[in-house]
Image: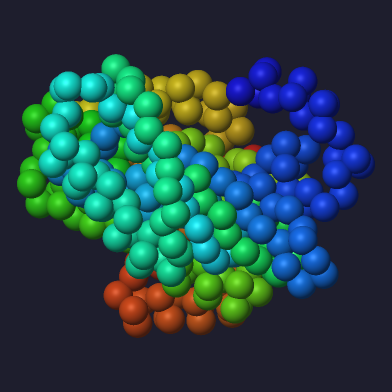
Amino acid sequence: MAQVLPPIASIFEARDYPSLLVGLAQPDDAAVYQLSESQAIISTVDFFTPIVDDPYAYGAIAAANALSDVYAMGGQPILALNLLAYPEGLIDAVTLREILRGGAEKVKESGAVLAGGHTVTDKEPKYGLAVTGIIHPQSILAKGGALVGDALVLTKPLGVGVITTALKRDLASHDHVARATESMMQLNALASRLAVQYRAHAMTDITGYGLVGHAHEMAYLGGVQFSFNEADVPFLDGAFYYAEQDIFPGGMGRNKDYFERFTTFEGIIPTWKQNLFFDPETSGGLLIALPHEQAIKLIENLQAHGQTAVIVGHVTGSGSGELFFQ
């Protein structure tokens, strides 16, 4: 996409669209368009093929993943539209209804309204949402903005990629899949709201590029470098077991091929664990940069609500997106 987007961006020069606060000129989790001095809209879209066997859970996960882009900007979703592709005659109406029900209930949980959508026939099923959110123009939490000295808080454990790959190969434990599904279905609403409350400097959600890919984007756009304590990064039960058996999706290798050049592993970290940091996530948590004192308050609040929140590293200096794991 890096080769495809620049020509498109050149058609819409930023200077010609001053109300477009976040767009192709400064890639982020979603686009933001200012309507007035006190209000802007957030717009995003996301969909993918089934990641779990249960159609209801698949719909809920896909919806949570799409809604997450609004939360990653610090906004509140207000409106969603379904995007559904399916192989005609190969999926029954009950299955399709369960996918849509899962998505609809997750949208309702977010406080937004589902107002319609679009369907097409395709060789394999795909589902997701186009989502509109709102935010104050001064409250946008973009990827760039992390300051030297900030703590880095991660709000969900990693490991979805290896666990769902093990599921596809009929090698996964039911308990491991259930915990991964629960994590993917969890909205990032509370974490986002607290990040805004505690005046975070930057934020993104961890999805297809894995922790390394999204952390690099965040550090690069902020002109800084990140240092992670690898032992503090939380993982889902079973992630280590499947990683040691090299049960990784193809996306891990692609992520590693590109982002490894920005990443330094210090000390003795086995290759299988290094690979977990490149592993694609689906509907992952938020990575938040904010002052250490505020990070402690955010973590205490999230943990009081039964959610994961851990300081996994710090912004250690100026740079060009370098990442260090030690």
Task: Give 315 or 124, whichever is nearer the viewer.
Answer: 124
Residue lying furthest right in this view? Answer: 15
Colouring scheme, one of rainbow, by chain, secondary structure, one colour: rainbow
Report x, y in % for residue 246: 24, 27
Q: Residue at x 59, y 27 (%)?
A: 261
Exactly how many numbered labels are in the figure? 0
Residue 257 can be seen in this image:
yes
Quarter residue 122 falls in: top left
**42 vs 146, nearest the viewer:** 42
Q: Quadrant of residue 1?
A: top right
Q: Quadrant of residue 276?
A: top left
What residue appears at the point 60 percent right and 77 percent down from the top-left corner?
198
Q: Compared with residue 215, is residue 7 higher up or lower down, i.e. above or below?
A: above
Image position, residue 208 (x, y; %)? 44, 37
Whether residue 183 appears in this view of the structure is no
What is the x, y in percent for residue 309? 41, 67
The residue positioned 66% from the left and 47% from the top of the image is 31
Apparent side of residue 306 relative to residue 166 in the rendered image (left or right): right
Q: At which x and y percent is residue 177?
A: 16, 46
Q: Is residue 93 left or right of residue 271?
A: left
Is 61 situated left or right of 299 in this image? left
Residue that appears at 59% across and 78% down:
197
